[in-house]
Image (cartoon, helix red, strand yellow):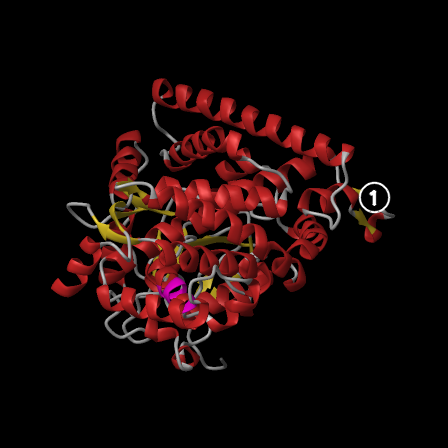
């Protein structure tokens, strides 16, 4: 690093002005097509660009080595107090997703046992049961939109595994709350009051609904202990030796439960919807998947011990999350004066790592727009540079639920693909829509084809 010449800022667009009209124009352009908007800026200014603002400004990065600097090598210099988290904190509170510093370290330490390898192995049975129920519901249909069905599935899995309860009766209420949060969080901060006020009212109602649900979960667990303990029980029982055995406050328990309830199911449901869309459009991938399921499972449902042998199924999930990473950006703020590459980053500056574009680097992933699960087979992924693939983030703030999410997704894909085949029925591909997570805009409409049906056989012969 000695002898390197540091520059004040990377290239980037000019300031957008101080007027409300400039803010609204920028907000509308970004909101309508954030991926096209940011992609054009990367094309014009390079792998790192600087967007000036009335605050400290924004550094936007996509290259793997830049992501590694922010998330791993200088992780202590970048904190999670980015403005992107301000609105999210108003919804989720100070759970693991939004907390920072000592609060985050304490909550992470207390929640770790719920996501240990042995605990996740114990969750396999309810994951399989919920996936079989979803497969049966889908098999009874002629056509459907897979996106909301995957939300329903992952909510049931989270409810049964982490909270030890059936949330089927609350699926609609939770789904509505999530939609209200999504709309609120992506709205430009300076929209007129007559637009923002009703949005805020819906968010307040959604928050009240979730608070009521959490209160019932906690009351149930206090009345009837879970053995082995689920996440709710662990949070209620947790004591912090660094604070004289203090327990989590009621609000802290609430914030963690809401975080895992919403963020925990939303990421995997979107990954599953995208996975089945991609499978339905690629007959070769589908046939290889079905061949693996026949070889490994035969006619029986998957078991926890099968996960390590479902290598192609896992590769499908990984490649899906390369193309459509549920958490498609990672925001940070510089806590001290620091640097990225040869550029100075003053304290208070905001940084966004655009994972969506990191995963589309042609130097790392040749033909990056192509769906190719073999990228993750036979050790080929060993050539991916550190932080070149970030579906669960990296560094000390990497996702606590990675093992849980991967097991859940592989089980769901295997179980549903055993029972049904899909034919994509949309007029055009789903449009990636940047919300809290990367959702398929327009949903994933499909026709249901049963593997043993004459229609399915005809379809196979014609491809």
Q: Position of residue 331 (x, y in %)?
A: 46, 52
Q: Residue 223: tell me if it is visible.
A: yes
Q: Position of 212 compared to 446: left or right?
A: right
Q: Is residue 423 above or below residue 403?
A: above
Q: Residue 437: tell me if it is visible.
A: no
Quadrant in the picture for the C terminus = bottom left
Q: Observer-nearest residue: 209 or 295?
A: 295
Q: Write down the region rendered in magenta.
A: 314-319
Q: Dividing the picture into quarters, in which one does residue 113 lie?
A: bottom right
Q: Position of residue 30 (x, y in %)?
A: 28, 43
Q: Is residue 214 above or below residue 341?
A: above
Q: Position of residue 102 (x, y in %)?
A: 70, 51
Query: Which residue ends up furthest to the right in the rendered image?
Result: 244
Q: Which residue is mark 1?
A: 246
Q: Position of residue 141 (x, y in %)?
A: 30, 40
Q: Observer-nearest residue: 56 or 184?
A: 184
Q: Is residue 394 above or below residue 239?
A: below
Q: Is 315 in the magenta? A: yes
Instruction: Give the main secondary structure, helix, strand or loop, of the magenta stretch.
Output: helix
Q: Residue at x 50, y 22 (%)?
A: 205
How many numbered marks are there?
A: 1
Within 10 Å of disc 1 (Cα), the crowding (few <14, some 14-19, many 20+) is: few
Identify the element where label 1 is drawn: strand
Q: Dividing the picture into quarters, in which one does residue 435 lie?
A: top left
Q: Observer-nearest residue: 132 or 120?
A: 132
Q: Is 122 in the magenta? A: no
Q: Dividing the picture into quarters, in which one does residue 29 lie?
A: top left
């Amino acid at each position: 690093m000695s002898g390197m010449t540091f520059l004040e800022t990377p290239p980037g667009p000019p300031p957008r002005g101080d007027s409300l009209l400039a803010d609204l124009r920028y907000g509308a352009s970004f909101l309508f097509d954030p991926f096209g908007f940011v992609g054009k800026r990367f094309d014009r200014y390079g792998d790192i660009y600087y967007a000036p603002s009335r605050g400290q400004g924004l550094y936007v990065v996509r290259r793997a080595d830049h992501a590694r600097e922010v998330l791993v090598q200088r992780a202590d210099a970048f904190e999670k107090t980015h403005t992107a988290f301000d609105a999210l904190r108003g919804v989720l509170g100070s759970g693991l997703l939004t907390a920072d510093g000592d609060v985050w370290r304490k909550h992470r330490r207390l929640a770790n046992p719920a996501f240990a390898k042995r605990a996740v192995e114990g969750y396999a049975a309810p994951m399989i049961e919920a996936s079989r129920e979803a497969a049966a519901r889908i098999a009874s249909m002629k056509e459907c939109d897979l996106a909301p069905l995957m939300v329903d599935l992952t909510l049931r899995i989270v409810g049964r595994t982490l909270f030890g309860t059936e949330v089927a009766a609350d699926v609609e209420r939770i789904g509505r709350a999530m939609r209200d949060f999504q709309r609120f969080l992506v709205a430009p901060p300076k929209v007129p009051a007559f637009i923002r006020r009703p949005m805020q009212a819906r968010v307040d109602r959604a928050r009240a609904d979730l608070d009521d649900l959490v209160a019932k979960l906690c009351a149930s667990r206090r009345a009837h202990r879970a053995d082995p303990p689920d996440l709710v029980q662990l949070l209620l029982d947790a004591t912090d030796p660094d604070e004289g055995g203090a327990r989590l406050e009621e609000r802290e328990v609430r914030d963690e439960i809401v975080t895992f309830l919403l963020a925990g199911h939303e990421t995997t449901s979107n990954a599953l919807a995208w996975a089945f869309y991609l499978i339905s459009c690629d007959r070769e991938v589908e046939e290889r998947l079905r061949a693996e399921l026949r070889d490994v499972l035969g006619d029986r449902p998957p078991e926890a011990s099968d996960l390590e042998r479902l290598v192609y199924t896992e590769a499908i999930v990984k490649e899906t999350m390369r193309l459509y990473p549920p958490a498609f950006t990672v925001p940070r703020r510089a806590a001290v004066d620091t640097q990225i590459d040869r550029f100075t980053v003053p304290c208070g500056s905001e940084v966004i790592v655009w994972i969506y574009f990191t995963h589309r680097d042609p130097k790392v992933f040749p033909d990056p727009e192509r769906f190719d699960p073999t990228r993750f087979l036979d050790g080929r992924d060993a050539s991916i540079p550190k932080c070149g693939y970030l579906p669960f983030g990296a560094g000390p703030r990497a996702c606590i639920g990675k093992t849980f999410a991967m097991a859940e997704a592989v089980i769901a894909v295997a179980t549903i693909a055993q029972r049904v085949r899909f034919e994509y029925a949309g007029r055009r591909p789903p449009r990636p829509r940047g919300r809290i997570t990367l959702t398929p805009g327009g949903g994933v409409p499909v026709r249901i084809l049963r593997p043993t049906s004459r229609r399915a056989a005809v379809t196979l012969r014609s491809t």
